């Protein structure tokens, strides 16, 4: 029995000969973090994220039908207009994983052209936006072939496929807030794909801002694959998974009620716990830099002094995401430019905000 038979495309005849599909998909920032997985790419705990708006990948998929299906996948990859062979193995293993769900893959020669709106090697992970954009293009091709598929099913399967490329990518298709992972308090949630947060979100979160401070643009010390593996046999793993589930329950209420103080508490605790997990694994890692800590302390001071609702979160790296209400935009940007830019590598930061997900161009 195959794992998710509902996502296997029906037998298809009349494949289109050639064409090109272009789409864009954003990055996302987790509020409750996914850290730890089971095969194949299933999360140990449910996570929730803000979909971003500005940090995006733009991907074109050109497809040309072959006379005879090839034995292997046939694709070229261009990143910012140039061949990029080091991305190919990741796409190859993505295709291998999704082939049973998209049986037409070997009948095509593909050219994948991709670029990001955020600077290359800025320390911002492009796997979430990149894999969701590619899954989106592939599902638009499936839609041409399988016209009976409903929009809801199409979106679900796109998220399902994106997850097989990079776990957190499944949370990038919709916005402004998505949940991935089965959770008793989130109706319709699943380990297999992400869903849109199924409640009305309080207006405090409308246009919520995320300014990303680029503290260290170096290569990631630990890939997320290695990072997730560190949770196997981790002494605090089970407690962590339970804490994540409890934090998601709390955040669900916060997103509905607009309680920003509790939002800050949960989000900052999640960020520090993610890093605490890395510091307490074997081998252990410290992914924050001295400037990460300086920024965190400055944020706490600023909050104490002004009563602001500014808070921070972190990914598996040194960069800091500053989250704050739209109503505080001007003051916080003043604070960033006057006091925090000094901690950014080459003074670089990116102004982003909560967004709506992937779209066809
Ligand atoms: O999707 P991955 O395997 O790159 O893992 C992402 C992990 C974190 O970014 C640290 C947390 C998250 O939930 O996005």
Image (cartoon, rainbow, N blue to C red):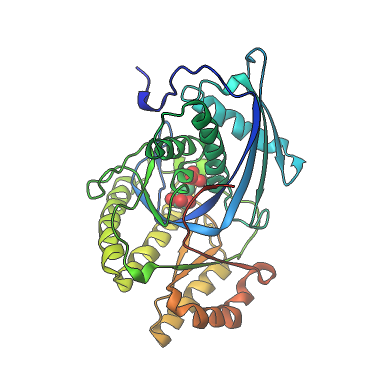
Front-most of residues 166 and 81: 81
Judge whether residue 232 can be spotted in this image.
no
The picture places residue 325, in percent across and down from the top left corner, at 42, 73
Vertical placement of residue 10 versus 22, above or below: above
Q: Does residue 77 appear to the left or right of 32 in the view shown?
A: right
Q: Name the image quarter holding residue 31.
A: bottom left
> Residue at the location (56% across, 37% down)?
137
Q: Does residue 5 appear to the left or right of 123 in the view shown?
A: left
> Residue at the location (46% across, 62% down)?
354
Which residue is at the far bottom?
A: 305
**Quarter of the figure that contains the N terminus:** top left
Which residue is at the far left?
A: 184
Which residue is at the far top?
A: 68
Which residue is at the far right?
A: 82
Vertical placement of residue 202 versus 83, above or below: below
Judge whether residue 224 can be spotted in this image.
yes
Front-most of residues 117 and 203: 203
Vertical placement of residue 231 versus 335, above or below: above
Front-most of residues 349 and 45: 349
Q: Name the image quarter holding residue 154.
A: top left
The picture places residue 109, in percent across and down from the top left corner, at 67, 25
Q: Does residue 183 appear to the left or right of 267 in the view shown?
A: left
> Residue at the location (46% across, 25% down)?
101
Q: Does residue 295 appear to the left or right of 49 in the view shown?
A: right
Front-most of residues 204 and 39: 204
The picture places residue 93, in percent across and down from the top left corner, at 57, 29
Vertical placement of residue 116 versus 335, above or below: above
């Amino acid at each position: 029995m195959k794992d998710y038979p509902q996502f296997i495309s029906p037998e298809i005849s009349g494949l289109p000969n050639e064409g090109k599909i272009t789409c864009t998909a954003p990055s996302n920032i987790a509020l409750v973090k996914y850290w730890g997985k089971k095969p194949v790419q299933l999360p140990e705990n449910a996570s929730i994220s803000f979909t971003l708006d500005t940090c995006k990948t733009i991907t074109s998929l050109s497809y040309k039908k072959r006379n005879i299906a090839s034995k292997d996948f046939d694709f070229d990859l261009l990143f910012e207009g140039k061949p990029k062979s080091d991305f190919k193995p990741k796409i190859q293993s993505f295709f291998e994983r999704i082939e049973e769900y998209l049986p037409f893959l070997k009948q095509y020669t593909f050219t994948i052209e991709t670029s990001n709106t955020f600077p290359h090697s800025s320390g911002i992970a492009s796997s979430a936006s990149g894999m969701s954009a590619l899954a989106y293009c592939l599902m638009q091709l499936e839609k041409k072939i399988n016209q009976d598929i409903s929009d809801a099913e199409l979106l679900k399967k796109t998220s399902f496929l994106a997850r097989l490329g990079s776990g957190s990518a499944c949370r990038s298709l919709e916005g402004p807030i998505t949940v991935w992972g089965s959770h008793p308090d989130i109706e319709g949630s699943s380990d297999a794909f992400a869903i849109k947060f199924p409640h009305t979100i309080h207006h405090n979160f409308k246009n919520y801002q995320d300014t990303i401070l680029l503290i260290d643009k170096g290569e990631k010390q630990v890939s997320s694959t290695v990072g997730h593996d560190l949770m196997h046999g981790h002494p605090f793993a089970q407690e962590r998974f339970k804490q994540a589930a409890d934090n998601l329950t709390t955040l669900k209420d916060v997103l509905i009620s607009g309680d920003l103080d509790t939002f800050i508490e949960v989000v900052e605790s999640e960020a520090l716990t993610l890093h605490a997990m890395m510091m307490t694994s074997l081998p252990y890692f410290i992914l924050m830099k001295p400037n990460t800590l300086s920024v965190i302390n400055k944020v706490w001071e600023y909050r104490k002094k002004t009563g602001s609702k500014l808070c921070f979160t972190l990914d598996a790296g040194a960069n800091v995401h500053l989250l704050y209400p739209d109503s505080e935009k001007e003051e916080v940007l003043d604070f960033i430019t006057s006091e925090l830019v000094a901690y950014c590598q080459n003074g670089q930061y990116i102004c982003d905000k909560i967004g709506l997900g992937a779209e066809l161009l």
